[in-house]
Amino acid sequence: MKKKVLAVLMVAALAVSVVTGCGGSSSPSKSGSGSASASGSTSAAAAGGEYAMKSGSTTPDTHPYNLGMNRLNELLQEKTNGAVSVDHFGSSQLGGERDLIEGLQLGSVQMCCISTAPLSGFTDSFLVFDLPFIFETNEQARAVMDSDVGTEILNSVEDQGLVGVCWFENGFRNVTNNVRPINKPEDLKGLKIRTMENQMHMAAFQIMGADPTPMAMGEVFTALQQGTIDGEENPVPIVESNKLDEVQKYNSLTGHLFSPAPVFISKDYYDGMPEEYQKAVMEAGKESVEYQREQIDEQTASGIEVMKERTGMETNEVDKSLFKDATAPLYDQYIKDESGCVNPDIYKRVMEVVEAN
C-alpha cells in the first residue's frame, strides 16, 4: 500500500515539475502525439499465458508504435512458448502518457510505448532530444539510441519504477499549415503553430517568429478546421493517420526535431519474472526495433503520397541549415548557460556519436 501511495505522489510531483521544468509539458493530456478512436486490443497474436501483460500507447492502431509492440508480442510468445505475452492497446485506450507511467508504477499496466516528453520531470537525461536539429538523419538518431549513451538514457528512470526495454521512434517532426509553404524561418512569422507543451519546443518556434500554441493533440483537427491555429508540427505518420491533411494544404519537411519513443516495463512486474523470461523480454524488444523502424520509414514515405492523392496536400523540402542557424542560440541557453537544463555530459557524448555518423 505504501508503495502505491508513493507512486501516486511521484506522478503528482511530476505533473508539478513539468510545469516549470525545462522541456516539460504542463498538462497530462490523454492524446499524446496523436489520437484516434479505436476499440479492443491491437495485438496481432492473442495474449495469454502465465505472464499476460497489458500495454498501452496514445497513437492510432495503425501507427508504428503499435505495430512494433505487436511484433514484440509475437517474438516474446515465440521465445517463451506462449508463457509471456503483451496485449497492446493504442489510441489512448489505457490513458495518456502520464497515465501509462502511473499505471506502470502502480501495477495496473505492465508495459508502454511513449514519447520522451513526460520523462523530463524524472531526469534531465532525455532533454537532449528536445534540442532542435540535433540530428540531421535517421542514421544519426538511431546510432545514438543504439549506443552506450542511448542505453544509459533509456535506463535512467529505473529508480522511478520504469525498466527500459528498447527504443522505438516516431521519426522527424515537420511543420504543416494552411497558409503558405514554409521554405525559410521567416515564413513562420506570425503563424499560430500548435506545439507540444514543451518549453524547448516552444522556444524554437518563438525564435523563428511563430506563435507557438500548445494544445492537446485531440483538439488539433478542430482547431485547424476552425482557424484557431494556422498549423502544427508532427511526424508524417501522425499527420496522415489523424487525417490532418483534410484541414491543411502544406507539408514542409523541416525535420526540426527527432522523436524517440522508449518502451518500458514495470520494474515491480519485471522483477517478479523468472530470469529466463526477463531475458526473453529484453531480447524480444531489441529484435522488434528493426521492424518498427521499417514501419516508420515506410509510413513516412507512403504517408506523403497518401495525403497528396487524398487531398492534394503539397509537400516541400527545405534548406534545413537556415532553420538550424536560426535556432542555434537555444543551445547556449539550454546547455552552456548555468541555468540551462540539458545535461551537458549527456549532450557531449550524444554529439560524439552524431559526429561519428
Image (cartoon, helix red, strand yellow):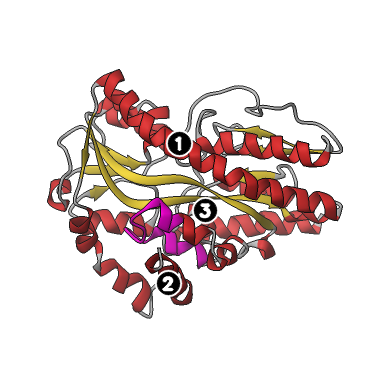
Q: Which residues are magenta?
A: 125-141
What's the distance in space between the residues labelled 3 and 1, CA to CA? 15 Å
Q: Which mark is residue 352?
A: 2
Query: Which x, y percent locates residue 327?
Result: 24, 62
Is 321 on the left-hand or right-hand side of 299? left
Residue 291, position as x, y percentages in the image: 56, 40
Q: Residue at x 43, y 59 (%)?
A: 129
Cβ–Cβ below 8 Å for labels 3 and 1?
Answer: no
Query: Which residue is depicted at the point 40% across and 59% down?
Result: 130
Name the disc covering residue 34, or none.
Answer: 1
Whether residue 88 is visible to the viewer of this picture, yes or no, is yes
* Distance CA(mark 2)–CA(mark 1): 32 Å
Q: Is tag 2's residue or tag 3's residue first in the polypeptide sequence? A: 3
The answer to whether residue 272 is seen in the rendering is no
Identity of the amino acid at label 3?
Pro
Of 285 and 331, nearer the camera is 285
Amino acid type, label 2: Glu
Residue drawn 16% across the image and 38% down it: 181
Q: Is residue 126 magenta?
A: yes
Quickly name the residue at label 3. Answer: 118
x 37%, y 29%: residue: 302
Measuring from the top left, give residue 209's x and y in whole percent. Answer: 17, 53
